[in-house]
Amino acid sequence: MRMGRWLAIGLAVLLAGGAAAQTYPDKPIKVVNGFAPGGGTDLLLRTLLPKLGEMLGQQLIIDYRPGAGANLAMDLVAKAAPDGYTLLMGSPGLAINPSLYKDLPFDPLKDFAPISLIGTVPNVLVVNPALPVHSVAELVALARKEPGKLNFASPGAGSSLHLSAELFKALEKIDIVHVPYKGGAQAMTDVLAGKPEMMFQVLGVALPYIESGKLRALAVTSAERAAVLPNVPTMMEAGVKNYAAVTWNGLLAPAGTPQPIIDKLHAAVVKALQDPSIQEGYRKIGQVPAFDTPAEFQALIRDEASKWSRVIKDANIQAQ
């Protein structure tokens, strides 16, 4: 009797989810971004969301909730109603923050329903042109000659850009000093002024400064060269063995969101990313269109969590 009752409840939930998906969405959808306007995630959302809204027949609105390494945004979405109207702009923080912060009020691997990746972008190692290095090898040589003298900026301790530098330090066994900021804008401003001398930056954000000559690009962090910087080597081509670190973004819903809604969102993402106008828009900001299944996206988050937990532990990184 009890088994029959639970089967009836499960069937009712399934039917309700299917009915909701048939009319979904019937109002605007909120996409929560854990970073301030003007950064790489903002550029990506502003490029994709109008087309995604066309596919779904509703407007998608960016809700900016910066702070605490995107934990504020993740917590908000984790606790939101699982109805498909509040989504998370996922970033590497999903994989990084469990190893960086104690007692998170949510579980990044359990409290979200992955929808799909929406893009990947390499980070790029940039230096102020006043620094007398023109390659990664020259930078490594200078750092070894003068350990502890060179400084690198990041938008915060434990950010993906910080960890990109820590991985570089560990693999090359060099001593360069981390200068954390409370956001990427001020970090970039100071690197442009020459103090600190360098940083790892999202390619789309750094590209205008590279093209204008205000920053010098030494290498990109992806496995392949970036189409917008064909003459800039990858870190591995530049001699840093086993180096790979890209910034990825994807959409997630609160856990418990009906599968038919997840499926509808996933199909819309895939269709939008195949549109030529979106592919051209991505190219202009250095992004690579990327989509996968919800299961593949979940596996990516788990793999990234394993990689970055080792970097955080070895470098004894603490959230600030």
Image: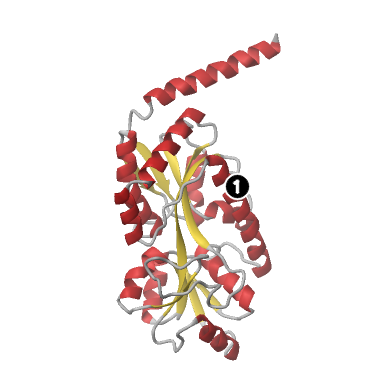
Q: Is residue 120 visible?
A: yes
**Could you say where residue 224 lies in the image, as x and y percent from the top left?**
49, 66
Secondary structure beneath label 1 = helix
Q: Give the residue number, with chain letter if any, for mark 1.
A: 299
**Could you say where residue 86 lies in the image, as x and y percent from the top left?**
42, 38
Q: Is residue 181 visible?
A: no
| Residue situated in front as seen by the camera: 50 or 63 | 50
User: Is 239 rendered above or below residue 65?
Assistant: below
| Residue situated in front as seen by the camera: 315 or 50 | 50
Q: Where, by quadrant of the figure, is residue 309 drawn?
A: bottom right
**Residue drawn at point x = 52 percent, y = 86 percent:** 138
Label 1 amino acid?
Ala
Q: Quadrant of the C terminus?
A: bottom right
**Residue drawn at point x = 56 percent, y = 17 percent:** 11
**Could you say where residue 209 lies in the image, as x and y percent from the top left?**
33, 73
**Could you say where residue 100 lies in the image, as x and y percent from the top left?**
61, 58
**Residue drawn at point x = 64 percent, y = 65 percent:** 311
**Residue drawn at point x = 58 percent, y = 53 percent:** 95
Q: Horizontally, is 221 left or right of 191 in the view?
A: right
Number of numbered discs on residues: 1
